[in-house]
Amino acid sequence: MSTDNTPTQAQIAKLQSLPMAAPIAALNLFKLNERAKYRPEDPEFGTPDADVSGQEAFERYRTEAGAKLTSLGGRTVFAASVDQIMIGPDALDFDLAAVMYFPTRSAFVAMLSDPDFQSSSRHRYAALARHSMLHIAGDPFIDIAN
């Protein structure tokens, strides 16, 4: 299990072994830090820009990463606060949930390797205490939004 909100090598290998042309949806579950935790290598570290809530840091990430998602043909299908855990252990305790759609798994990989996306991810690292992402198989994928 990854402890730093990034995929493990095994998870990356699995991603690379799946059909790259297939569309995917990504279910993201987010637990916010109360205060952002920027790292020493981040330009915000030690400046007033680092003195923000986890929610504020996440909004920075959402704005920047959302532009990259859109440029690759993807979109946020749904995003909202988590009200409760209805089925499953209460210890899951997430603040936000979001479903992102990618037209291909290749588009998702392209986003991950984009230097601008990688730079904006510093806000995600600062914002989140925990992040789980589940890829939902997209072959075949029915796009009910259109």
Image (tube, grey):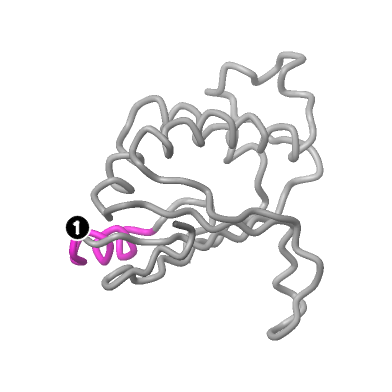
- Amino acid type, residue under disc 1 in the picture: Met
Residue that carries the numbered disc 1 in the rendered image? 20
Measured along the vertical axis of the image, is residue 34 above or below residue 19?
above
The foreground one among 26 and 44 is: 26
Q: Which residue, as the protein is rendered here, is positioned at the far front? A: 146
Q: Position of residue 104 (x, y in %)?
A: 27, 53
Q: Which residue, as the protein is rendered here, is positioned at the far bottom? A: 87
The foreground one among 69 and 35 is: 69
In the picture, residue 72 is in which quadrant?
top left
In the picture, residue 9 is in which quadrant?
bottom left
Q: Residue at x 74, y 33 (%)?
A: 56
Q: Residue at x 71, y 83 (%)?
A: 89
The foreground one among 77 and 69 is: 77
Q: Residue at x 30, y 58 (%)?
A: 12
Residue 32 in the figure: left or right of residue 12: right
Q: Residues within 10 Å of mark 1 (few under 14, many from 20)?
A: some
Q: Main secondary structure of the magenta part?
A: helix
Q: Is residue 17 magenta?
A: yes
Q: Position of residue 38 (x, y in %)?
A: 64, 30
Measured along the vertical axis of the image, is residue 117 above or below residue 110?
above
Residue 23 in the figure: left or right of residue 116: left
Residue 75 in the figure: left or right of residue 63: left
The foreground one among 16 and 24 is: 24
- Magenta-drawn segment: 8-21
Q: Is residue 85 magenta?
A: no
